Image (cartoon, rainbow, N blue to C red):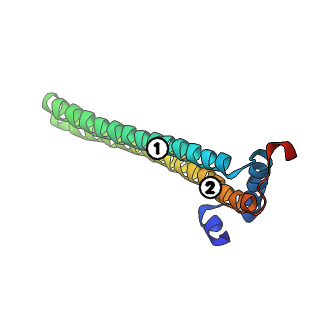
């Protein structure tokens, strides 16, 4: 369905080209079913990578906040009252840099997830299209 392609960011031409490539390599519905099963396994692996990256980013952010908090707590005991401003200024700068790096990392993870969705949905749409074509005319490997 073309509206689904647009929602995912895939053009009708992309799906048509992928379907033609699949049709040129697949000779029966059984092979297409195997390709779909393999795509599901690969997609699950990609989703797991995105989850792992998200957890790693969250853990790094939590460790940075905890470490900065501990540093501030310990340092505040040993500095004079006129140095508190410098201490707070350095921690604010740390949070600005850490927040910027976390945001860049989050954008990279989101982009990777979006690219995975585009690739796997495009291949699924193409497999569906190829399945329709194969159903119309199943051929043997000798005929290729």
Q: Which residue is drawn at 65% across and 65% down?
A: 5
Image check: 64 left or right of 26?
left
Q: How crowded is mark 2: few (under 14 residues within 10 Å), some or many (20 or more)?
A: some
* Front residue of this view, candidates 120 and 94: 120
Residue on which disc 1 sits: 50
SS at badge 2: helix
Cα separation between marks 2 and 1: 20 Å
Image check: 115 left or right of 26?
left
The total number of labels drawn is 2
Residue 90 seen by the camera: no
Q: Which of marks 2 and 1 is nearer the N terminus?
A: 1
Q: Are marks 2 and 1 in contact (CB under 8 Å)?
A: no
Residue on which disc 2 sits: 124
Indicate the position of residue 136 as horizontal and vertical percent values: 76, 63
5 up-or-down from 123: above or below: below
Image check: 11 left or right of 100?
right
């Amino acid at each position: 369905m073309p509206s689904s392609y647009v929602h995912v960011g895939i053009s009708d031409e992309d799906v048509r080209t992928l379907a033609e490539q699949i049709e040129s390599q697949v000779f029966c519905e059984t092979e297409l079913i195997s390709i779909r099963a393999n795509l599901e396994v690969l997609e699950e692996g990609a989703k797991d990578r995105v989850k792992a990256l998200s957890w790693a980013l969250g853990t790094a952010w939590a460790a940075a906040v905890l470490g900065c908090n501990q540093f501030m707590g310990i340092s505040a005991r040993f500095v004079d009252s006129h140095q508190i401003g410098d201490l707070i200024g350095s921690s604010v700068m740390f949070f600005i840099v850490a927040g910027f790096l976390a945001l860049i990392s989050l954008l990279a993870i989101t982009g990777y997830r979006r690219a995975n969705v585009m690739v796997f949905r495009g291949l699924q749409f193409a497999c569906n299209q190829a399945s329709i074509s194969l159903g119309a005319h199943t051929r043997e490997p000798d005929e290729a």
